[in-house]
Amino acid sequence: MTHKERMLMAIRGEMPEVLPYTPRFDLWYNANSYTGTLPAQHRGRTADEIARAEGWAIHKVIPELLKVQNPEENMHRGLGVYSLKENGYRVHLSPNVEVKVSEDAGLKRVEYHTPIGVIGVVETVTEEMKKAGASITWLQERAIKKVEDYRVLSYIFDNMTILPDYERYTAWQASIGDDGIACMMGTFSASGMHHIQRDLLEATDFYFEFKDHEKEMRGLAESIDRVYDQILRVVAASPAEVVLWGANYDDMITYAPYFAKEITPGLRKASKALAEKGKFLISHCDGENLKLMDHIRDSGIHIAEAVCPFPMTKVRIEEYYKQWCGKLTILGGIPQSLLLKETASEEEFQAYLDHFFKAVAPGTRIIAGIADTTPPNAVFDRLVRLGERIEREGRLPLKAGAFRPVSEAEIAAPAQTQVTAVSDEVFQAVTADVLKGDHIGIKANVQKLLDKGFPAQDILQKGMISAMEIIGGKFKTGDVFIPEVLLSARAMNEALAVLEPYLAEKAEVRGKILIGTVLGDLHDIGKNMVVTMLRGVGLEIKDLGVNVKVDAFVNQVAQYRPDILGISALLTTTMPEMKKVIDALKAKGLREEMKIIVGGAPVNEKFARDIGADGYAQDAGEAVTLVKRLLAQICEQRKTS
């Protein structure tokens, strides 16, 4: 039986003779081929040749957007549309849209000149990104910057045409043959609104725009949806067997009510159209899915790819299998952290595999793979041994044996936080402004209280911080979601601007936090969420941004004297920078003056302990709890010293 036959059987809910195994390792390959560090036996080989040599199915779900024959194939990355061989179609803009491209100092600027206005994007690929195996450019400047841009973008999408381009796709499909499934890339987003969120706005800006300019945003989403209808007709009529539709779900960013309203309808529509043509919909479900489990299961997705379980997320593999295997196929299940010696010992790696074979018994609707992808600094031998164990122990049907099922208490459910009302009626208007995120009204209400002689510190503590405590508690219990937190924090920050002159000499700083993303890493979504939520509970934050050098961390610590230093990394290749920062602080005699916390997708508690950090937080909500606990420890230490 071929790899392709095994995978298609698993997708149909049938049982091949052995678990299919298709590890994704494009980033690992890109990084190690770029730096000349491929294993000796594989030097000079392509990624597909390595997979074939090792006997693995070739993973072809997510296209490599930087590997193109013609610059026009990824020219419109800033618009979120492509004309790759994997698409099976080409994107054509109206002749009335003039595209101007310029490059300077490694930055590529693409401008779209239309009869009704101009929009532009700026993208780059840094040396650090190349060493990390990047397969897509980083958008330094996104398309939407002002409300007028919605109308210009609507014009571009309203005049966009999608034309079939099956010839290049079928040639690529033939090159893979029976060694894998050549997934056609329909779209990275599930709907027009999701497209705006993923590609056209920064993550935090999206929620503010959704609140402030929903009408304009809805209009643009409708224009994009009409392009999606064209794409769906083309991919449904294509020679592809599996079509990628939608990617990058996370229960904080694409939170449950948003997912149900803005993402599920697009997935169901695509699923129905593809199923009618005998095709399967695959979606890239690589994030934290704890609060999206039912939504994803019932969305119409046929294959959930890049499924990443505990210990990298809060959902264990047995929970995924129990809840999803009746309706969809799981592709993934092996967390990338297990391939890193920094985050998993050899014993932990083997123990997870022991558990995996029991947890997914009897083995229907499961294709083993790495979630999200093999890191550049992975122990390649673990990838090899994983394939060997699957070949040896993955004979179907699997036996569950006597493994201990996970209990509800073991799933990292949000802590139940007591939420109390603010009793002081004088400050209720300000409190209400914070709770509903009214960043305009709160300034007037704060000024009224100041004019009446109320102390600025009381307004801050009793009217604003107490409200953010309520919001934070409700966020933990799942009663509010990230947009409400961000909007409340924005309202609080606007009010602080009014209060600041009155607080300058009297305010007692509750805690000083310095935070930044390490050198070589340009990711900032998680860090920005943490910054917003910490500011929202009244802490003083200095954000160093992304790509921060070790010396910059040290110098800023020396100048700012924080109580807590927060260090973030998303790329596994940049994780060692965290230890360099801590070691440099020790060398300068600054380490003992503060607590250090770390976070980011590839980081875990073990890694935090090993590099000498004081704590690790899995998400923004946990970061607030961790910071408060550490600040309390600092306060006690200062009292006793």
Image (cartoon, helix red, strand yellow):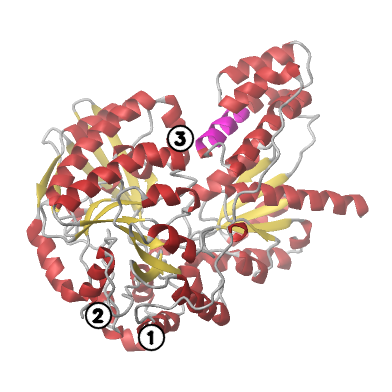
Q: Amino acid at mark 3?
A: Tyr
Q: Nearer the viewer, mark 2 or mark 1?
A: 1
Name the residue: 9% across, 54% down. Answer: 165
Numbered label attached to residue 207: 3
Determine the CA span between mark 2 and mark 1.
18 Å
N-term mark: 1 or 3: 3
Which segment is the magenta one?
483-493
Q: Position of residue 183 (x, y in %)?
A: 22, 62
Determine the CA span between mark 1 and mark 3.
46 Å
Q: Nearer the viewer, mark 1 or mark 3?
A: 1
> Which residue is at the front of the view, 576 or 553?
576
Taking the magenta stretch, the answer to whether it contains residue 246 is no
Relative to residue 51, is residue 163 drawn left or right? left
Q: Secondary structure at mark 1?
A: helix
N-term mark: 2 or 3: 2
Secondary structure mostly taken by the magenta-highlighted segment of the chain? helix
Numbered label attached to residue 388: 1
Please, is residue 204 above or below residue 561 in the view?
A: above
Q: Which residue is mark 2?
A: 49
Name the residue: 24% across, 37% down. Answer: 225
Disc 1 to disc 3: CB gap under 8 Å: no
**Quarter of the figure with residue 257:** top left
